[in-house]
């Protein structure tokens, strides 16, 4: 039976002979070996197969259940794939400021999406994938002694988030809502150190997550001592802070340093005798806890204090023996240490302090050289380590606040006007307060988003917090605010976190 020989279609190209199908492949191979100049054999023919026919499959019937055996579980179709699913494990995460040579699609991966992914990773890291929404921890031990981390404390300085560059890990933590800060501080020593640092505030400000909150000291219910609360907004309610450590005091002073509230000194009445304190406690608004700092060198009450260039200055007041003080000391947060510096020219008490242009200003109160209230302003220059005096001070001030390098004061004898001090030329001006409620209402000043708030220090039904905006057009500076302490406001501070 003969072999099937495929036909050659079309004429032979020039210089190419028609294949010889009369010889077997073995004969052709032998002839080629004997005569190397002969033409090579043609390529083997390719057989074109017809497409496969569709075969109809018989319908499947469900298997009959077997007694005593659990039927197979119907898992259903696979879940839909999320837009970012798989990208965390295969696509390198790059900061928007890190330029890489990628396609245009990668270039379009904007920072907002990137930030959302980092936020998702942070939340999943903190609270777990099974319970993404849990109630944040609200308090930690209040009386613990503050310990400053060192590089020998184990994992204190390990990676913030394993697998991420350091700068991206910091952005990731800064994007987490502030209600999770106490939980984040309990994850590791490194997280606690970073959250409590100045850099954390700087990163939150850079990514647009820095928030201001007013912390008000209010009178306690049922004869209890004063307590602190953070004022909420329309969407949030006021929240009470953990109780201040130690005994209930009076005559203490407060100041904000690096986003933390410091409550210093004061006195306690014990069996009819005043016991003046030198204790200092710090409230961390990010970790929601109190800690003890180094004690002052001199116990004092009714003194002036202010933050200047990252340090806390305290001046004057009454000492343990009841005499007026002229001593001044400064607190260094890096070393957790108080240091005595140049004293005032005269003992001074019942005064207050503020900072302008890197200098300490002490105003109001009384001194041993004056009869009644002091109108002198003592100014301390930390660079020159010297005191100067300005003779254009105020009288007895019940509350004060600093906004846009200007001092706003409420004087004891006139609660219906604001006294504004401009340190550039040491000038004063008066602004009338609108009449709302009783004319004898005492006010406590607060600051939020560059606006001045007037909280009532007396129980007055229907009173709404007054708000003064110095940047508004003339005639539209005064408004009302929904922010209101749950009790009588004794004083307030503003903390960014």
Image (cartoon, rainbow, N blue to C red):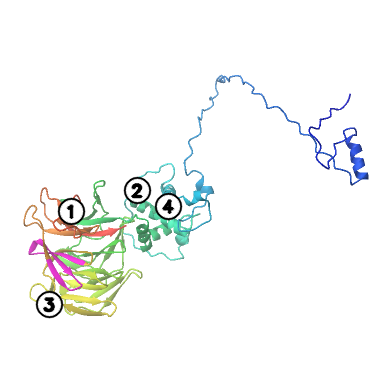
Q: Secondary structure at mark 3?
A: loop
- The numbered dot on residue 368 is 3
Mark-to-mark CA distance, 4 and 2? 27 Å
Tell me if residue 173 is in the magenta stretch: no
Whether pointer 3 and pointer 2 mark residues with C-beta atoms closer than 8 Å, the reply is no
Look at discs 3 and 4 and give the one toward the viewer: 4
- Residue at figure coordinates x 92%, y 45% from the top left: 35
Asked whether the viewer can see residue 28, the reply is: yes
**From the viewer's perspective, is 400 left or right of 209?**
left
Mark-to-mark CA distance, 3 and 4? 61 Å
Look at discs 4 and 2 and give the one toward the viewer: 4
- The numbered dot on residue 136 is 2
Mark-to-mark CA distance, 1 and 2? 25 Å
Q: Which residue is mark 4?
A: 111
For the N terminus, give its image quadrant: top right
- Percent of width and height locating residue 51: 68, 27
Q: Nearer the viewer, residue 263 or 191?
A: 191
For the C terminus, give its image quadrant: bottom left
């Amino acid at each position: 039976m003969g072999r099937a020989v495929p036909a050659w279609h079309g004429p032979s190209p020039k210089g190419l002979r028609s294949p010889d199908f009369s010889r077997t492949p073995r004969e052709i191979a032998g002839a080629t070996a004997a005569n190397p100049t002969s033409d090579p054999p043609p390529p083997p023919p390719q057989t074109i197969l017809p497409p496969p026919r569709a075969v109809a499959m018989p319908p499947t019937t469900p298997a009959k259940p077997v007694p005593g055996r659990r039927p197979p579980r119907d898992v259903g179709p696979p879940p839909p794939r999320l837009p970012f699913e798989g990208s965390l494990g295969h696509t390198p995460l790059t900061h928007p400021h890190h330029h890489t040579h990628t396609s245009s699609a990668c270039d379009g991966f904007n920072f907002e999406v990137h930030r959302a992914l980092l936020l998702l990773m942070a939340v999943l890291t903190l609270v777990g994938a099974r319970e993404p929404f849990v109630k944040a921890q609200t308090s930690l031990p209040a009386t613990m002694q503050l310990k400053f981390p060192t590089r020998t404390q184990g994992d204190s300085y390990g990676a913030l988030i394993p697998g991420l560059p350091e700068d991206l890990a910091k952005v990731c933590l800064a994007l987490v809502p502030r209600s999770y800060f106490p939980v984040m501080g309990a994850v590791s020593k490194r997280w606690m150190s970073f959250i409590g640092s100045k850099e954390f505030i700087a990163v939150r400000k850079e990514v647009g997550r820095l928030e201001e909150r007013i912390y008000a000291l209010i009178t306690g219910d049922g004869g209890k001592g004063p307590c602190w609360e953070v004022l909420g907004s329309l969407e949030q309610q006021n929240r009470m802070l953990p109780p201040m450590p130690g005994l209930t005091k009076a005559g203490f002073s407060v100041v904000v340093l690096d986003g933390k509230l410091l409550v210093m000194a004061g006195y306690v009445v014990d069996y009819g005798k005043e016991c003046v304190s030198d204790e200092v406690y710090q409230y961390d608004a990010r970790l929601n806890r109190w800690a003890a700092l180094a004690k002052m060198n001199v116990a004092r009450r009714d003194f002036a204090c202010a933050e200047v260039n990252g340090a806390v200055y305290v001046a004057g007041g009454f000492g343990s023996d009841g005499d007026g003080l002229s001593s001044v000391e400064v607190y260094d947060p890096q070393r957790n240490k108080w240091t005595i510096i140049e004293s005032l020219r005269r003992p001074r008490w019942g005064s207050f302090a503020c900072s302008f242009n890197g200098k300490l200003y002490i105003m109001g109160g009384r001194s041993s050289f004056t009869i009644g209230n002091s109108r002198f302003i003592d100014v301390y220059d930390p660079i020159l380590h010297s005191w100067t005096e300005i003779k254009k001070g105020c009288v007895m001030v019940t509350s004060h606040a600093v906004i846009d390098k200007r001092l706003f004061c409420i004087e004891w004898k006139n609660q219906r006007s604001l006294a504004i001090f401009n340190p550039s030329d040491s000038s004063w001006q008066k602004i009338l307060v609108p009449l709302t409620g009783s004319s004898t209402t005492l006010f406590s000043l607060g600051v939020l988003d560059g606006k001045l708030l007037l909280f009532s220090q007396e129980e007055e039904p229907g009173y709404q917090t007054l708000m003064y905006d110095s940047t508004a057009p003339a005639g539209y500076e005064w408004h009302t605010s929904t922010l209101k302490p749950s009790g009588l406001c004794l004083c307030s501070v503003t903390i960014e976190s």
